[in-house]
Each structure stands twice: as structure tokens, then as C-alpha cells.
Image (spheres, rainbow, N blue to C red):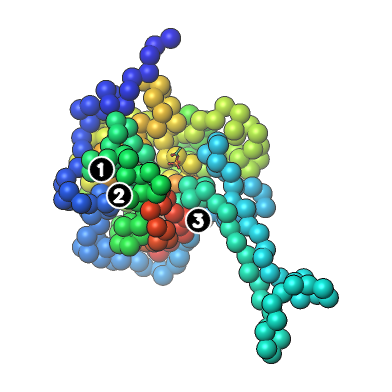
Amino acid sequence: MTEVPELTELLADSPSNWGKWGADDEVGSLNYLTAEQVLKGVSLIKRGELFTLQRLIGDPNGDPVWPGRSPATKEMVYDESDWDEGGEGPAFPGGLHYADDKLEAFLQGSTQYDALGHVWYGGQIWNGYDARTTIGGLEKASVEPIAERGVAGRAVLLDLARWRGVDALGPKESFDHNDLQECAKAQGVELRPRDILILRTNHLALFFVDADGFYADFGEPGLTYSPELVQWFADMEIPNLVTDTIANEVTYDPESGAALVLHNALMRNLGVAFTEICDLEKLAADCAQDGVYDFFYVAAPLKIHRASGSPVNPVVIK
Ligand code: UVW
């Protein structure tokens, strides 16, 4: 069996944006989304139609999550039964009743933004911060600064499933930056520097027809690592990678066997924000219909203190 290289070795010469936006930066390539980029995105609004990209939390059909994480659970704390005879609902003057509920959830367990400090190797997270700053909650590069600034700009949907002529990409099916460019060409959309990239595989559809099969030999379709792909992301100044898979990449790099190489090459080293587990179906159907694959995208993860990620409901406006 060939030995899996350490990421320190595999990514030794990989491009890095550490220091590019100062020694105290915590939002990385989102810095590319300047006011000018936001306005370029806004200029694409033609119909005023909204598409929300979040999957339902607590979907009665189940929530697909990374193996080892559990789906969110929601519990009613108060409902009308608490004011039935013998119920313990608080009494308010005037007869007020109300519904209250609470959520227990992995912050990476639904449609989410990853904090730049979510993954690392070699004892350092984004921008060179010491990985020990993650202990007890991310002191650096948590999701807070991303939530504080918000995300908006021109985005392009690349519908890889439709481009490949399938309903959904299969397990471990990979594509690279050349495929992204070919797909864009076939869709008649121009990929421009600083675009937010939205990639559709529709792979999670498998979870909803056969969850056991989905997890049996867990491996998602997605981008796979190559030095050229990472350089392309760096040259294109991609701020944000958004997909409808759980981890935005093929889990184990087919070449080296290392896990989540792109999380590290793109997120840890270049500061690319990752948005995962999106529902792109309505948006993709609309794009196929009107042939317009570029639009305004806006998202605001929640401000959660020192968190490694946050649920989000990104919105596309066409
Ligand atoms: C892991 O970190 C395992 O995955 P994700 O980025 O998909 O939450």
C-alpha cells in the first residue's frame, strides 16, 4: 500500500494568500468582494426573482450530514398543550399563550458557511494563526468576522450534472477547473475573476431515495486537488465556493489518498470561503429555462461567537 503523504508535504509549494490582507485578516478571499463587485452583482438583477439556497433544517425526509455528525433536532418547549388542564405554561395577564422551541445542531450540519479556521494542518490555520487558538472556540478566523461583513457579489452557477447529461453525479465522480470552464462555455456564461462559484451535482438526491446506500461507501462527487486547479482559483481570485454537496470536494484525493485536500489548499491557504449542502434545484431549473447563469448572490451567516461555521440561507436574485 502506498503511503499517504502529509498535507505539509503535499501542499508545500501550494499558493498562499497569508498576509495578503494584513496579519490580522480573518475573512481571506472574501476581501475580493469589494463594493465594485457587489455593484456588478446588483447590475445583474433583471426580473427581481428570488431563489433561496438553504435546505430545510429538520426535514421530515431526513438531513444529509457528514458521517459522524448528527442531524439537527428541534424540540418544542411551549405549545398549546402547556396551557391544557394541568399544563405548566406560564400564566400572563390577559391570557397570553405562545410557542417556543429550541434547536440542537452541528453548525456544519446544514446549509452552512465554514469559518476559515474550520480545517488545518501543520499546527496553523488561515493566515498563519496558531491552531491552538481553536481550543475552546475559534479565537481567530471563526465565522464571526464573515458574518460581520456579509457576502455579496456576482455569482455563476455551473450545472455539472446537466452538462454531463445526468440527473445527478455519482459517488466520487470528479471534475476540475478545466471542466468548470468547459461547462461555463457550454452554458454560454463567462467566468470572470472574483466570481462566486456555485457548483451543482445534485448528488444529495441519492440520500433522499436511499440514505443507507448514500452512506454505505461514503464519497461525494466534486472537485479534486491538482496544483493547476489551486493556481486557477488563486489567479481567478475566487472568493467563495458554493456547492450542493456536504464537503465541496471528493473526500479522499484519488491521487494521494489524503482527505479534504481542497479544504486545506483553498480554504486554509487561499482563504476561499466554503458554503456547503445547498439546495440548487429551483435555481438550476430556472437557469436551464432562461439560459441565464450569472446573477446577484447574497448571504449572511449567523453571528455565532467563536464558531467554526454557521447555518445560512443564501439568496440569489435574478
Ligand atoms: C468537514 O470538515 C469534515 O466537512 P465540512 O467542511 O463539509 O463541514
Instruction: Single out the residue that lies furthest toward the top.
Output: 1
Quarter holding residue 84: bottom right
Mark identifier at residue 67: none
Q: Secondary structure at mark 1?
A: loop
How far separated are the C-alphas under marks 1 and 3?
31 Å
Type of the residue with mark 2: Lys
Give left or right: position of 318 versus 73.
left
Q: Residues within 10 Å of mark 1 (few under 14, many from 20)?
A: many
Q: Compare marks 1 and 3 and give the one earlier in the sequence.
A: 3
Q: What percent of the width, then of the height, locates residue 287?
A: 44, 54
Residue in front for this viewpoint, 161 or 98: 98
Q: Which residue is mark 3?
A: 54
Residue in front for this viewpoint, 174 or 83: 83
How far separated are the C-alphas under marks 2 and 1?
7 Å
User: Which quarter is ligand 1 in?
Assistant: top left
Q: What percent of the width, then of the height, locates residue 174?
A: 42, 30
